Amino acid sequence: MIHKFLKTLLPRMLAATTCALIANHALAQGNYPSRPIRIVVCTAPGGATDLTTRLVAQKMSEKLGQSVVVENKPGADTLLGILYAKEQPADGYTLVAQSLNFSTLPYIKKTPGYSPTKDFIGVGTMSRVPFLMVVGGEEPSKTVSDYVARAKKEHLSYGHGGTAGAPHIAGELFLRAHNIQAQAIPYKGNGAVMPDLIAGRVSFLFDAYVSSSGFLTSGRARALAVANPTRLSVLPNVPTFKELGVDFSYGVWLGLLAKAGTPPDAVNKLSEALRYALASEEVGGRLRSDGSDVSFMTPRDFTDYLAREYEDMGKVAGELGFTKE
């Protein structure tokens, strides 16, 4: 009799438990976010990624109704922060702010510890930043053509902020596009290149407007061209490379990523909060004034973009001869 009773009762109990779990899961998702969200920035405070993320995070918090806190975890060419974010739960409460390094590190590290296409998904881009070809204020070349002619006669060098970083890749692609050579000199960050660029010890640098504007305004540096399909509104007199006869564009994205497996509801809410931030004058207007493109990308579009970029970086790494350390 008892056996018969249990046989009838147990399926009902299991069904009730399952329904309760489903209801609780739905309720939890419906309440997201119910506590503060962290965005891990993999660089030290004060850089372009850090400043942009803090600007965006503050505005996102208005839409989400929760604090969005920026947490800096620099080290190992941004790898430390990436791996930290990878180890956190896939619940939408820990994001990571990244740039092109995210797609290049697996090609220069023997044990990167993550896969760009398997361990993370895109939330959206915060900005896309075209690069400028910047020379020192006393550089004799007044145009790109002048520089190319000089490089064909002299042994020149250029600076970049680290091997396989975006300024390095941009520099090498520029040299190839113009069929010239210059020795690449690595520094610890683009900021460290500027004193030598101004002094004439290196001949050019690829940099974003936001980080070079002070030097350009003061005349200590000059922009010869912008690696963008169109001119920048903040530098209307600086031509594009395409205008100068070479279809060369290059820049970097700054974006937010979540751990793979994060519930779609959470990702969508984060995406909408990011869209809200970029549409505001406080964030979107400010970033545009710094020469950035704040066109919105959905999570699906950004994730697909990351997959294509990762594949493309494999080809670039092979062409430029990057080695793993």
Image (cartoon, helix red, strand yellow):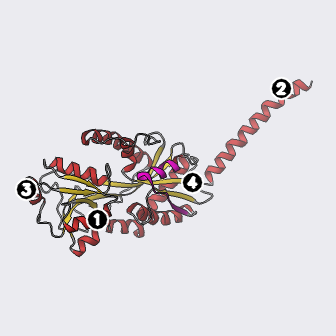
Which residue in the protein does label 1 denote? 209
- For discs 1 and 2, the disc positioned in front in the rendered view: 1
Q: Is residue 283 left or right of residue 13?
A: left
Q: Does the residue at mark 4 contact the one at mark 2 (Cβ under 8 Å)? A: no
Q: How far apart are marks 3 and 1 (CA)?
A: 25 Å
The answer to whether residue 249 is seen in the rendering is no
According to the picture, the residue beneath numbered tag 2 turns out to be 7
**Magenta residue span:** 68-84
Q: How many angstroms separate mark 4 from mark 3 (CA)?
A: 53 Å
Q: Residue 283: x and y, percent? A: 41, 67
Left or right for 221, reference 96: left
Residue 78 at least partly seen: yes
On the picture, is 113 further left or further right than 129? right
The answer to whether 62 appears left or right of 247 in the picture is: right
Type of amino acid under label 4 = Tyr
The three-letter code of the residue at mark 1 reads: Tyr
Give whichever of 270, 247 is nearer the camera.
Answer: 247
- Quarter of the figure that contains the N terminus: top right
Q: Which of marks 4 and 3 is nearer the N terminus?
A: 4
